[in-house]
Image: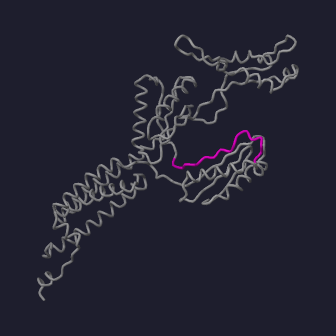
Amino acid sequence: MSVKEIKDSVIREFKLTTLALKNRNTVFLLAFIILLFGGISYKNLPKELFPDIVIPTILVQTTYPGNAPIDIENLITRPLEKEIDGINGIKKLSSTSAQDASMVFVEFNTDVNIDDALTDVKDAVDKAMSELPNDLLFDPVVMDIDLSEFPIININLSGDFSLEELREYAEYLEEEIEGISEISKVELEGLNDREIRIDVDLHKLEALELSFYDIEMAVTAENVSISGGEIKLGSARRSIRTIGEFQSVKELGNIIIKRENGKIVYLKDVADVTDGYADPDSYARLDRQPVVSVQVIKKGGENLLEATDKIFQTVERAKKSGRIPADLNLTLTNDQSEYVRVQLHNLENSMVMGVIFVILVLFYFLGTRNALFVGMAIPMSMFTSFVVLNLIGFKLNMIVLFSLILALGMLVDNGIVVVENIYRFVSRGYKPF
C-alpha cells in the first residue's frame, strides 16, 4: 500500500469538530453570542473577596450577674444543654460558663436550614425556662452566627470636634449607608454612650433614713410623660400630653426624695448628679489617634464592588451637601474592594498577555492562522466560563479568580498541543474531511 493510500484510508475524526467545520457560519454566530453574553455575565457577576462560609451555628447567651462560673454552669448552662441536645441535626454542642454569663454554641450539619434551626433552638430554650432561676434580669438571647458578615470597609472620622459632634456625623453616615440595598448593617465603634450618673453619699442617705429604692422610685415617678386624651377646638381635635422627662441634670437634682414634717429632701442633697459618658465598650484608633469608626457590613451574595462604589458616592454627597464639614477628616481603611479589583485586574492582564504572547510565539512557528486559533481560544473559554458561573449562581471571589488564572495556563498548553497536532497532519497532506 502506497503512502497516499495510507493517507486516504486512515482518517482521525472527531464528530463535533467535523460538525463545526461543515457549519462555519453557525459557529461564528455562536462565538459572537458567547462573547456578548460572556461580557454581560462578567459585568453582572457578584464580586467579593472570599466565598460565603455557611456553617449553621446558633448562640444562646444568658446573663446572670453576681454568680460564679460553677453556679452559672449548674443553674443555667446544664438545663439549656439538656433541652437543646434533643434537637435533630446537631453536629456539635459546646458551652462556656463564665462569671455572670453563659454561652451555649449549637453547630448543626450543613444540610440544616438556619431558620429552622433557629426556631428549634428558641423552642428548646422556652421549654428550659421553667428550670432556670426566676430572678433572671433578661431572658436568654438566641441568635445565629453568620461568618459571612464582616466589615467590607471602615470609615474613620477624626478632627478638631467634640465627641458629640463626631457622633452626630457618624450617625448621619450610618443612616445614609444603611439605605443602600447591598448593605446589611452599619456599626459604630469608638463611641461612648451618654450616661447620667447619680453618685449617692451613703452617710447622708443613712442619716436621712433613705434607701436606694427611694431614689429609684422618685426618679422613675418623675421622669414620665402622661397622655391626657383629646380636646376639641372648633372643627379640630388636639391631643393633650404632659411632658415630664428630665431636660437637664439640674431638673433631675431638684426632684423630691422625701417630704416629712415640713422638711423636703432633694436628690441633690444626698447625691451628686453629673452628665457624662459610660465606660467605652470599644476603642477605635488610627495612626495612634482616637477616631470614630463606621464599619459597613455587606449582605451575603451582594456585589462587593457595587456596594463600595455606592458607599463612596454617599460620602461624596454628604460632603457636597454640607452635612459633613470640609475640615472633618474621613479616612477609609480595610477596603475589601481594593483586593478584588487587584485580582480582577490580574485576571484581565493574564488574558490579554496570554493572547499576545501565544499569537507572537505561534506566529513564528505555525503561521498566522494557527496562532489566531489558539489566541481566540483564550477569551472564548473565559467568556464561556463567565456565562456558566452566572447561570449556576456562583460569585467571583479570590478562589474562583485563582482557579480561572490557573486554568488559563493549562488552556494555553492544551491549545498549542491540539493546534500543532492538526498542523502536523495538514502539512502531511491530509484533507480536512
Instruction: Name the quarter where the N terminus is drawn.
Output: bottom left
* Quarter location, residue 5: bottom left
Tell me which colouring the rendered structure shows.
one colour
Quadrant where the C terminus sits is: bottom left
116 or 206: nearer the eye?
A: 116
Magenta-tinted stretch: 132-148
**Count of numbered circles in the view:** 0
Corner quadrant of residue 205: top right
Residue 254: x %, y % from top left: 74, 15
Image side of residue 88 versus residue 376, left or right: right
Q: Is 300 on the left-hand or right-hand side of 413?
A: right
Describe residue 233's horizontal placement relative to residue 25 as left or right.
Answer: right
In reply to whether residue 187 is colored magenta, the answer given is no
Find residue 427 and report its horizontal and vertical position in percent: 14, 73
Q: Residue at x 22, y 72 (%)?
A: 15
Q: Is residue 54 placed above or below 216 in the rendered structure? A: below
- Dominant SS of magenta comes to loop
